[in-house]
Image: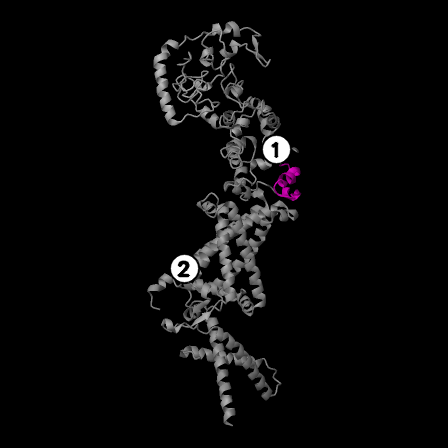
Amino acid sequence: MDSRLGKSCMGAISPFPEQEGATPVLVEGRCSAWWPRSPTKPGAWHLKVACLLAGAALFLGGESSAAPPLSEQRCMICHGKHGFKKVDESGAVRLLWVDLALLKSSVHRNKTCTDCHHDVVEIPHKERPARVYCRRCHYKDNPAGAPSSDAYLEYERSVHGRALAAGETKAPVCQSCHGNHDILHTRNPKSRVARGQVAATCGRCHLEEYSQYRNSVHGRAVYELGVRDAPDCTGCHGEHSIMAVSDPGSRVGALNVARTCASCHGDEAIMARYGIEADQVETFEESFHGIGVRFGSKRVANCASCHGTHDIRPSDDPGSSVNPANIPRTCGKCHPGANPNYARGKIHINPKIREAGIVYWVATFFKYLTLVTIAALIMHILLDLWRRFKDRGAPA
Amino acid sequence: MRWKRSRKSEKEDRDLEKRLRKEVASELPPDLPPEVAARVRRRVEALIAEELAAAAQERAPRQLPQARGLEPQEETFQRFNLHFRIQHMILFTSVILLIVTGLPLKFPESPLGGLVWLLGGLDMSRILHRVGGSGLVVVGVYHVAYTLFHPDGRRDFWLLLPRPKDAFDAIQAIRFNLGLAGSKPRFDRFSYIEKFDYWAVYWGCVIMIGSGALLWFETLSLAYLPKFMLDIAKEAHSDEALLATLAIVIWHFYNVHFNPSRFPGSMTWWTGRISKHEMIEEHPLEYERIMAARKLLERNEDQARKKGSAAAGS
C-alpha cells in the first residue's frame, strides 16, 4: 500500500485513484476527485463504498505509515544551494533553488516545505513532487488558519478553472497569479495581485489586452496618477470568478457590462471626485440601447460597443472611439452609412436637465402640456359627475 | 312613413320650414317675374326635398326581425357610417397595439416592462409596434381620403371645425354643472367634447407618425438630420404617447363609455347608431335639422300627390 495513504486531504480521500484500481488512496498527494485533471467522476454509490473502504484503510494502516514531518533545514540542504538545478528528459533546465528568505517574508512564513509539498516524505525524494494544491488549506472555515474563503469554488466555475478542467495545460492555477514561495497579502502593494500589479500579472498571458489597458484612461489613472478608484483588470472582470465574455454570468458580457460600469460610473460620490458626469448610466438605461439591453438584446449597443473595452479613452482623446471625429466609424459598426450627423448632439442626453438644450425644452413643453391637459380633463369629468349625482335624486 | 310628433316639435318644424322658405325666396333676384320666381322656388324646393329624402332614408329606423318577437324599437339615428366605423376600428386596434408595446419601453422598470416578455420578447414587441404604427398610417391616409372624397366625410369635417360656439358651449357646460347656468348647451352633430377628441387624435397622429417614422428609419433620418433632431423626435414620441394614452383612457372612455348615462359602455362604435333619446339629449340641433328636413319632404310629397290627383280629376 502506498505509504502516503493517510496524509490529510481534509478527510476526503479520492475513491478513484488514477493508477491503483479501486483501492481508495491519495494519489500524488491530491484528491483526484477534486483535482480537475481527474478524468473520472465518482458515482454516488461508488463514493459511499469507497468512503467506507477509505475509512477502514485509514484505521488499519494510517498510524504506522505516517512519517514524521521533515524540517525545512533538511530541504535547504539541496534547495538552498544557488544554482541547484535539474535537466529533465526533454533537456529543459529546471532551477530548483529556493530563496528561503522569500518564503519567510511571504504570508506563508510560518509554514514549512512539507506543509505544501506534503507528498515529499523522504529525502532525497525520488520523484518530482506534485504541483502544490492550495485547496488543502484554502477553503471556507478551514482549521489551518488560512483565510476563510470559497474562492476556489469560484475559480472552478471561472473560465480559467473550466479551461483547466478541459485539459488546457496553459490554463492558470492559483500559483500562476498569486506566485509560489513569494505570495504576499493582497493589500501589500508588492503582491502580484495588488492594485497596480495585477494588470501586469494578467498581462503575462493577456499581453495585447494589457498593452491596450495600460494606455487607456483607466490604465493611466492607475499607473500614472495612482487613482485608487480606477479599475484594473479585476475591477471589471472579477477575480476568481472571471467568466468568458460569452458566458451569461460574465461581468463584462453584453447584458451585464452596463451594470459593471455602473458600479463606479453610476456612483455620484466616486464620479464627483474626478468631475465625470454620473448620469451616463441613467441616460444609457433610458436610451433605446439601454432598453434593448434590459430586455435581453445582445445585438444592441452596450457601454463597450461604443467606448471600447481595454482601450477606453476620454472622448477628447483623438484615439478615442467616442471622439466626435470617430463617431461615424464607431456608430457605423451597427448603423450602416453613419456620418458626422451622428455626432451632432450629445449621445448621453438627459432631457430632464437644462444642458440638454432644445430636447429639454421639448420635454418641458410636453410635461406641462400633459399636466395642464389631463388636469383640465379630470376636472371636467369630476364636475360632470358631481352634477349628475346631484341631479340624480332631484325630479326630472 | 309617418312620425308622431309632439305639439311643440311640430311648431318648431313649422318655424324652421318658414325660415328655409324665406331664405330660398330672399336669394332670388327681386326683378324676376312672379311666375318665374314661383317656378324656381318649386324647383329648388323639390331638389332640397330629394336630397333630404335620401338623408332621411339613411336615418330611418332599422328594421328588426319581427320573428324574434321584439317590442317595436325606439327610432335610432345613424351617427357613423361604415367607412367611419372601419376607420375607428383600425385606429383603436393600432392604438391598443402601440400602447401595449410602447408603454413598457417608456417605463421599463415598472411592472409594465413585463408586457414585453408577455408579448414574446423585445423583437416581437418591436414588430408589433411597427404593425401598429403602420395601422395608424393606413387609417390616417384612409381618413384624409374619406374627408376629401366622401360627402359624409366632407360634411363631418366641416361640422368638426372649431367655432366660437364651442368655447361658449364649454363655458356654459361648466357653468351648468356648477349650477350657475339654467340649461345645458345645445349641441349640433359634434359637441365641443367630441371636437376635442377628434382634433386631439389629429394632433396625436401628426406627432406620433412624424416622430415615429424618423425613429423607425433612423439610418435614413440621420443621413439628412443631426442626431439631436432624433433626440427631439424620441422625446416627443414618448411624451405625446403618454398624453394620448391618458387622454384616451381618462377622457374618451369616460365620455363615450363610462359616464353614468352610458355605463358600462356604448356600442355605437360597432352599430354606428344612437337612440332618438340620445339624439335629442346630446345633439338637439342636429335632431332639429333632420326633423325639419323630414317635414319639408313630407310636404313636398303631399303637394305632389295633390297635384297628381288634381291632374287626374281635370
- Residue A332 sits inside the magenta stretch: yes
Q: Position of residue A156 (x, y in %)?
A: 47, 26
Q: Give the class, few, some or many, for how many residues have Cα within 10 Å of label 2's Cα (few <14, many ≥20).
A: some
Q: The disc labelled 2 sits on which kind of residue?
A: Phe
The chain identifier of the residue carrying mark 1 reads A
| Viewer can see residue B135 | yes
The chain identifier of the residue carrying mark 2 reads B
**How many labels were placed on the picture?**
2
User: The residue tagged with tag 2: helix, strand or loop?
Assistant: helix
Q: Residue furthest front?
A: A21
Q: Residue at x 56, y 41 (%)?
A: A299
Q: Give the class, few, some or many, for how many residues have Cα within 10 Å of label 1's Cα (few <14, many ≥20).
A: some
Same subunit: marks 1 and 2: no
Residue B144 placement: quadrant: bottom right
Q: Position of residue A215 (x, y in %)?
A: 62, 27
Residue marked by disc 1: A314
Query: What segment carries the magenta color?
Result: A322-344
User: The residue tagged with tag 1: helix, strand or loop?
Assistant: loop
Q: Position of residue B231 (x, y in %)?
A: 58, 46
- Image quadrant for the N terminus of chain A? top left
| Near-viewer residue (A40 or B145) | A40
The label on residue B258 is: 2
The label on residue A247 is: none
Residue B177 placement: quadrant: bottom left
| Near-viewer residue (A28 or A284) | A28
Whether the residues at callouts 1 and 2 have beta carbons within 8 Å, the answer is no
